[in-house]
Amino acid sequence: MRNSQRRDDRRLAEGSDLRVEIEALDAVRAGNVPAAVELWGRNGQLTVTDDHDAQTAAVVTDWTAARQRGEDVVVLAGTRAEVRHLNTALRASLSGTLGDDVLVAGGRAYATGDRVVATRNHDVTTPTGPPARITNGTIATITHVDVDHGRVDVIDANGTAYRLH
């Protein structure tokens, strides 16, 4: 099988030094992750803290600042336990900015203003009734919570609205 490589990556951080990014990505592709980490650290794209709590606080601070600048930002984690931990911390930072009505489903709380991600393809409806399909990976913002009927309305980045039950 022929080996192919992508020579450029257009998802670079705004304001980052393109040469550093290309060099770091080449290091990762070559299997030299420590060299990439060193480059990112020198370029101010890596935050190192003394412990887990400090790292969580740094993630929350950076995420909050990015949202306040109007950036569309997502936090990723390596394990489901870490996802739960970060979601709890990030959601706590939103205190007072989410809607008052809360729908609890699957052990999770959802309120107007929450951002959610679809974890599978799913046939749904739209708020006006016609059927639609939301696809795995779609990120959307909750626009309305209907606790009485156990559903939420969301809108994705393209402006497409869905009703989730």
Image (spheres, helix red, strand yellow):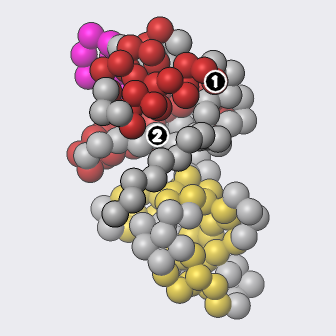
Q: Residue furthest bottom?
A: 130
Q: Position of residue 77 (x, y in %)?
A: 35, 41
For the residues labelled 1 and 2, the Cα–Cα distance comes to 22 Å
Residue 112 shows in the view: no
Closest to the camera, between mark 1 and mark 2, is: 1
Q: Is residue 112 above or below residue 61?
A: below
Question: Callout 2, which amino acid?
Answer: Val
* Label located before the other in sequence (1 or 2): 1
Instruction: Give the residue displayed 43% in from the left and 73% down from the top.
Output: 120
Question: Callout 1, which amino acid?
Answer: Leu
Q: Residue furthest front?
A: 2
What is the secondary structure assignment of the residue under circle 2? Answer: loop
Residue at image mark 2: 75
Q: Hey, which quadrant is residue 37 in on the image?
A: top left
Residue at image mark 1: 18
Is residue 102 within the magenta segment? no
What is the secondary structure assignment of the residue under circle 1? Answer: helix
Q: Is residue 67 above or below residue 143?
A: above
Is residue 50 within the magenta segment? yes
Q: Which residues are magenta?
A: 49-57
* Residue 113 shown left or right of residue 45 in the figure: right
Label 1 Cα crowd, 10 Å radius (few <14 / some 14-19 / many 20+): some
